[in-house]
Amino acid sequence: MSGVPGDAPERGTPIALSGPERSVLLALRSIGGSPVDEDELARQVGLGIDAVRGSLQRLRSKHLVVVEEEHATSVALTPRGREALAQGLPEHRLLDALRRRGPIAMEDLAALDLEPDERSAAIGILRRRGVLADGVPLRLRDGPIPPPGPLPEELVLRQVENEESDVDPPIVEALERRGLVRTQHRSVKRWSPSDEGRRLALVDEGGTSIGALTPALLSSGTWRERVLRPYDVRAPVPLVGGARPHPYVAWLDEFAEVFLGLGFEEAEGPLLETEFWNNDVLFMPQDHPARSIHDALAVEGIDGHPPPTDLLARVAAAHEGRPLPGEATPIGPGWSASYDPAIAAHPVLRSQTTAVSARFLARRPEPPFRMYSIDRNFRREEVDAQHHLEFQQAEGIVGGEGLTIRHLVGLFRSLAEAIGIRELRIRPSYFPFTEPSIEGYVRHPRLGWMEVFPGGVFRPEVLRPLGIDVPVLAWGVGVTRLAMVALGRNDIRELFADDLDALRGRGE
Amino acid sequence: MPRSTLSLRRVVELLPDGVTDAALEEMLFSSKAEIERRVGDELELSVTPDRLDLLSEGGLALALQGMFGAASGLPPIRRAHATVRAWSFEVDASVDPMRPCIAGARVRAPAGHPLDAGLLAEAVRFQEILHATVGRERRAMSLGIYPTRRIAPPVRYAVEEIASVRFVPLRGGSEVSGPEFFANDPMAARYGPLGSGGGRCLTLRDAGGRLLSLPPILNSHDAGEAGPGDRELLLEATGTRSRAVREGLRLLLVVFSARGWSVAPIPALRAGSEPADGSPIVAPTEIELPSALLEQIAGTSLERSEVVRMLGRARLGARTVRHGFRVSAPPWRPDLLAPVDLAEEVVLARGVRPEDGVVPSTPTRGRRRAETVFRRRVATLLLGLGLAQPHTPLLVSEASVARLDGAAPIRLRNPVSSEFSHLRDRLLLSHVEVLAHNTRRGYPQRFAEVAPVVVRNPAAESGGETRYHAGTIVAQDSAGFADAAALVEYVLGELDVGAVREPAELPGTIAGRAARARVAGEVVAEMGEVHPRVLAEIGVPVPTAWAELDLTALWPLVARRDTA
């Protein structure tokens, strides 16, 4: 770095100082070691007291000055106190008059040049001190009378006027109650440079320094003749938030990589489905409890359409236990209930990604095939820490000659290992569209056994109407729950949290 | 999953001696029942919906007997001799519009072991489980249990005038008239509409005119209250669906069969119809299991004797036939419909172990959908602009919809709450909520989300089409229409799509400061300044710009160009 104007300071910490701050610091350094109060400093620097105070505070925040603070109490005369000192206290004047004139009738008090409130105060004070006898007219009690000369209160008033420090506190308090004196509390700050303030290298700016660079300064080149004022690089700065993928979305993306790595192709389906694709084609009986208005979310004001006629006829035959069109024997006994094609067209929010599998199979993919879909589903649930109307499933199907339940278990194992879990247990389960149906439980190091992989082999009643003649293994992983575990969340609602500070990386 | 609390003692007394808690727990893990809680004698179980029989102590004990090797094959189903031919249901056609189906059986206690309080409690508890599940809260099916000692057969099932009914309700105390019963009884309030209408109600009466019950509401005290010491019971099921009626009755039989009671079916007779003798109700189901199918599912070749043994372990009767096995399933196993169901029984009886798993070879290539990749690309572009990324639900609130004048998203017919009542048709509906939740956070606030919406589309199969949007919000001191338009231009530019902007009136925006962008007439984006009325309502103190790109509309344009 060179030492030409425009460069930052060459030595020391590059702390930025404004003009007044520089002046104040230079003045403190020139005074020497003893602390200086603000008034004195203002006089020396030639700046207003407020400007000096502001500069001192800023210098203090930069650790360049130190302050000693003294708390002082002083007593001063009020205007009434000054008047009383000049004329004598009202009780003094009344006492003098009684001495001079003897007893005084109340109506004659006006002649004593006492204000009405002063008269009553004076009478009260002299009575309390036992100087006045009871009753009227006013007269001195027999006995010792205070000697002529200033009263003790007047002596204290005088001391206050002379700014003496050794004053009698009870009398001061009494005078303050009478509004004759006022106690003032103030702190006196005495400033001196800190060690760092003494050491700080101050650039000889040789004129007005530059704060922010402006386009005008740059285009004119005048910055070359000026000093660029160093900034306080330790001062607080505005918050800046970065954008980053939503943690849940990012986790789902990563989870998809597991499927991609195992050779699965992605599929997608509509979120608003028909009952046909959501249920019927999956051999869910039309009176299944999960299809009721209490469990599935229906919509109003729109109508759906039935599927292609030939597919509808095949699915209806499977439900009713009749042979598929063109075949001689039924696939199975069906649900012993008549199939209602009108229900098939009802729109319903998708409750399982198995509907995506069904749509994929309806396209009659060439075996062998592997498909996955990670997507939203909806169930009619009250929202709480463990339940949400919306949840994600990772659906997977594998189709091909010779696939068996053992392959399904093998895939569960692969999936568990891919997410870092090695302990797996299998137990029986039930889904209307798979037989056998099983569930894979994995052992989480902290939470114990968790039910993660529900799956099975699609029933013939599902596959045959769709025209699939190879075994198809299917499962739907509850990824929402897995994500909660992986992301350390205890409340499912946090997955939909939209706190922008958290999303911008400003701490959670 | 269906659940209930069973008496552990009543289960264990039917099992071999020495069954430990640990063994029981382990065995249940391999079954379709799961222990939810156990306190003393109370065993709370949940079961998969196909194995309701396991929610009765008798049914669970029969299954466990097989698993522990204490019994094998089809449990004995003792058929009582139909000594009294007169036992039948005479079904009047008047029931057809209301509740046409009926089935029934008599069950008789083994000598010296009449009905006791434990068995009665088990039967009544299981009856209620069946009402709630198979019976769909009695709509599809309901069950009745009566002592036969006070019933003179045949039993007539008919519809009567409510005014003509007088009876003492079960546990009701005094006699009431039909109108009084329907007006005052809580059971009538709850189930009355299922068994009455137009001043008439369903009745079951014996030959002497004695009222057994008002199906599916309540039994009468006179003929319908079974108690300890009864030696023979009438079980009946009425309903709207024949399958549910059959299933309900067959499942209830397990309670009695497990304790050695014998069963006699009761025929249902209808004028002008062939008499149905009811035998299939209590008879085992016969299904053939081809060996080839079993091997195809199990993934291994099994000895025929082992298959028979495994089916026996599952409490199914089995014998070998030419190409497989002839299997008999007890009446309380309605889940066994087809050969594939029997294959599952064999597989599960053998046990499915992780170590048996085989990873299939992978001749397939993993790939994301090209459209998903495109959406991710847009999300990355927006992230690159420093826009934070919220993740919001598809369902939005009533209040949010009301805030945006003119918004008309699809509404749920059965919302759980007004907080999630509509399917958003634009992300702005969700993003206004994000703004409302963040009014205490620092500004500027800039965020974007690529997510689905559902828009009305009569041509779509469901009447609503799922589309993907990229929605952006810029809320800051200087935000305005230009910021929104600039975001759209930027993304379209990056996608190499040229669009034409035109003025538009859009929900929630300032008139004259909103626009649509079109490509070849199709809308690909909307943008505008959020109306100050909306901002004031949610407490946002700075101007806010909004832009939303329709990625579903853009994708074909981008895909066409990419493949060109």
Image: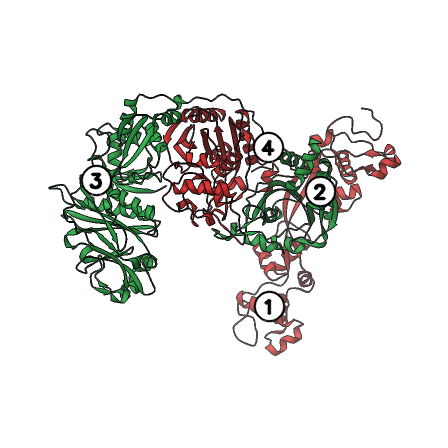
Chain colours: A red, B green
Is A449 drawn above or below residue A54 in the view shown? above
Q: Which residue is mark 4?
A: B369
Q: Secondary structure at mark 4?
A: loop
Give the camera-side residue of B75 and B466: B75
Q: Nearer the viewer, mark 4 or mark 1?
A: 4
Dot label at residue B257: 3
Disc 4 marks a residue whose amino acid type is Arg
Q: Nearer the viewer, mark 1 or mark 3?
A: 3
Few, some or many C-alpha atoms within 10 Å of disc 2 (few <14, some 14-19, many ≥20)? many
Report x, y in % for residue B223: 18, 56
**Which dot, 1 or 2, sits closer to the camera?**
2
Badge 1 is on which residue? A122
**What type is the residue that disc 2 sits on?**
Val
Question: Which residue lies under the disc numbered 2?
Answer: B488
Name the chain letter of the residue that bears numbered label 1: A
**SS under mark 2:** helix
Return the x and y of residue A10 as percentages of the image width and height.
78, 26
